[in-house]
Image (cartoon, rainbow, N blue to C red):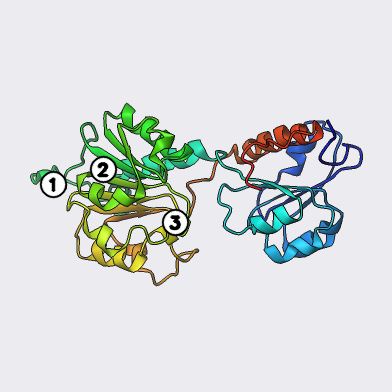
Amino acid sequence: MTPLIPAKDKLRLCFAHAAFDMKPIFDGFGRGIATVQVFNRDDLLACLPEVDVLVISALWKNDLLPVAGRLKYLQSISSGMNQYDLAAFRDRGIYVSSGQGVNRNAVSEHAFGLILSLTRRLALARDNQHKAFWRPDQTDPMQREDELPGKTLLIVGLGTIGDRIARLAKAFDMKVIGVRRDPAHGAGAADEVHSFHDLKALIPRADVVVLSCPLTEETRNLMDAEAIGLLKPTAFFVNVARGGCVEEEALIAALKAGRFAGAGIDVTAVEPLPADSPLWSMPNVVLTPHAAGETRKYERNVLEILTRNLDRLWAGDDALVNRVA
């Protein structure tokens, strides 16, 4: 079959990211490909006209597309694809693949870390450590740490990340309800699966609600004031999806009023979170700086997808891993 990208000795590949140092790892594979790495937009603009394959995420803006005259294949470093005009890529015959799954383990483990921090009051213990305060035994059972077996976990977004959260939850003997756009795709490790239309009927059943869905028009402000108001007084809410999936002011108001037990938040409406946000100082909130997807294996996980797709494109096969355009 006819190759869909230039031969190895003619192909120019660019890695573009402000933090990830991918070039030395890829070069160490000995693939015989000319590579360049940039860490800012100016350097990206300078090299982009000569690039055949681009590996990128946050540095991409759609106004770069006319500059990329030779581009044949874009591999996104991230799983989120909101910043890409996929129709424009299709019009230009440029293949695009997402980074879906590269941080599946990291995000699912982070979500469970937030759950355990809330139920076992680990964040409170750390706060007390900084105060050199040894908390006495609690006579009020509601002020004690809690355990997970028998509790119901509602996972909103039962994709690759959500399914692994479900698997972890089953190891803790939890009942798992999954919500996904198309329940016909299966329940995976969940005990039952429903559509997004059923969400508000499901929230009152949950002891823990976790968002792990992508940000789309369907999921924007999915957890609005009404949905937040349906949380049990004893329930916890965890968001490892996107800040835009939550009506943040309504969430803050409910947390201030103590309408539910607490929240583990990795993503916010504005990032970095403004210094004057009440979320910083709320005792019933565990806050992490959009770190759920961080992992020491991130670069290698992306490069695994990249190398598989390069081999397919050289073989004339356009059935790419995570292809979206």
Please say if the residues under marks 1 and 2 sit with CB atoms less than 8 Å apart.
no
Number of the front mark, 2 or 3: 3
Secondary structure beneath label 1: helix
Task: Classify mark 3: residues with Cα within 10 Å, few (<14), some (14-19) or many (20+).
Answer: many
**Residue 237, horizontal then vertical, whole percent:** 30, 51
Task: Work out whether residue 54 can be spotted.
Answer: yes
Which is in the foreground here, disc 3 or disc 1?
3
Residue 317 appears in which quarter of the rendering?
Answer: top right
| Residue type, numbered disc 1 | Met
Q: Nearer the viewer, residue 282 or 323?
A: 323
Q: Does 33 sit left or right of 98 as displayed?
A: right
Q: Is residue 220 left or right of residue 296?
A: left
- Amino acid under label 3? Val
> Residue 80: horizontal and vertical position, in percent?
55, 51
Q: Which mark is residue 119?
A: 2
Crowding around mark 1 (Cα neighbors within 10 Å: few <14, some 14 to 19, many 20+) is few
What amino acid is at disc 2? Thr
Q: Nearer the viewer, residue 218 or 278?
A: 218
Name the residue furthest bottom.
Answer: 276
Q: What is the CA distance from the residue labelled 2 to the residue labelled 3?
A: 20 Å
User: Which numbered circle lies on residue 142?
Assistant: 1
> Alpha-carbon distance for marks 1 and 2?
11 Å
Which residue is label 3 attached to?
A: 267
Circle 2 sits in a helix, a strand or a loop, which is it? helix
